Amino acid sequence: MSEIRLFGFDEFFENSLLSNFQAQVFRNPINIYFDTKPDKEFAGRDCLVLLEPPTVNPELYDKRFLNKFDLVIFLSPWRAELYQSRHWSFQPIARPNLPMSYAADRRLRIAIINDHKFGACESSRYGFRRKVIKLAQFHDLPLDLYGTNWEMSRTIELRKRLSILRRTTSTSLKLDLQECFGDLFHKYSSFRGHAEDKIQTLVNYKYNLIIENDIDSLTEKLFDAVFAGAIPLFVGPNLGRFTKLNGLVIQLPDNPKDAIMEIEELIHKDHSELEFRIAEFVKDSSSMEFLSVDAVSSQIYEHIYRFELAS
């Protein structure tokens, strides 16, 4: 086996990825960094695997940083498209455990489960999330907000916003000051506290409003809703071209006012066909195989193998 160095991988992901390299010999040592910066230089090919979006880790998307690597692999097909790269896989997502039981009579309400966070770049959807929650409250929609930090002090909130602003300002990413400072110190009347278990909370709700952290992220949020049997009202990347995901969700417009208008109409409609598709997805034990650690590891390996072969 070739010399493979891994940085930033958790043990399970590391073992799965290394198993793909067992029978392959490369001309050069391979250094693979997972959402991290190299603390020293090593001989060989430097490959960066990016899971977290620019909203969360703006430093990793600075052009000067990306140019240090021979190969960058995005764990989001939509982010790879934005960066004009053909090297991508999905984010690995574990198949959720089914809840112990489902509520016999779900509340005809909408749950949203997110921590209160802040971004300062154009791709961030934290500000979008705040606007939708505010509008839902203004329109008296039956929304229940769960998460942490929604009642943080003004001092802590300002520090968090300034911190992400400083981090983003130090990069080549385009700043969005409205995204960073919009709805400053707003109090959210729909806040219901922390959800100890997301799925056990969602089994009590007819709908789950899911607003991804970034315009091109697909995370566990969608699948928590699906396995809880809550209808996902989704703001995130367009899922239409991926057959496993297409038809599982109701995709909302990428505009807060339009999203609220659509939600107002949707909560009065029959969704039995969508609920059937969700149930079929949950019953299919292979439905999330393409999102498994092993599947993502294999795709990362394939990108590195083909890149090295072509070099």
Image: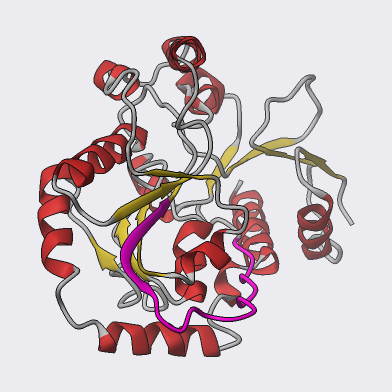
Residue at image x 87%, y 46%?
3
136 shown above or below 58: below
Note whether residue 130 is visible.
yes
Classify the position of the N terminus by image quarter.
bottom right
Q: Is residue 71 left or right of residue 168?
A: right
Q: Is residue 106 magenta?
A: yes
Q: Position of residue 58 (x, y in %)?
A: 49, 25
- The span picked out in magenta is 93-112
Tell me which residue sits at (76%, 55%) in the image: 13
Splitting the image into 4 quarters, where does residue 94 fall? bottom right
In the depicted structure, whether residue 4 falls above or below residue 46 = below
Place residue 21 in its image quadrant: bottom right
The colouring scheme, among rainbow, by chain, secondary structure or one colour, is secondary structure
Label tally: 0
Residue 236 appears in the figure: no
Report which quarter residue 36 is drawn in: top right
Image-based side of 171 in relation to 9, left or right: left
Image height check: is 197 above or below 242?
above
Q: Residue at x 49, y 72 (%)?
A: 203
Q: Where does the image place residue 174, in percent across and percent down from the top left? A: 32, 20
Residue 103, horizontal then vertical, whole percent: 48, 78
Q: Residue at x 44, y 87 (%)?
A: 279
| Residue 45, horizontal then vertical, whole percent | 71, 37
Question: Which sits in the foreground, 241 or 70?
Answer: 241
In this rendered view, identify the residue nearer to me: 31 or 124: 124
Answer whether residue 95 is magenta in the image. Answer: yes
Q: Main secondary structure of the magenta part?
A: loop
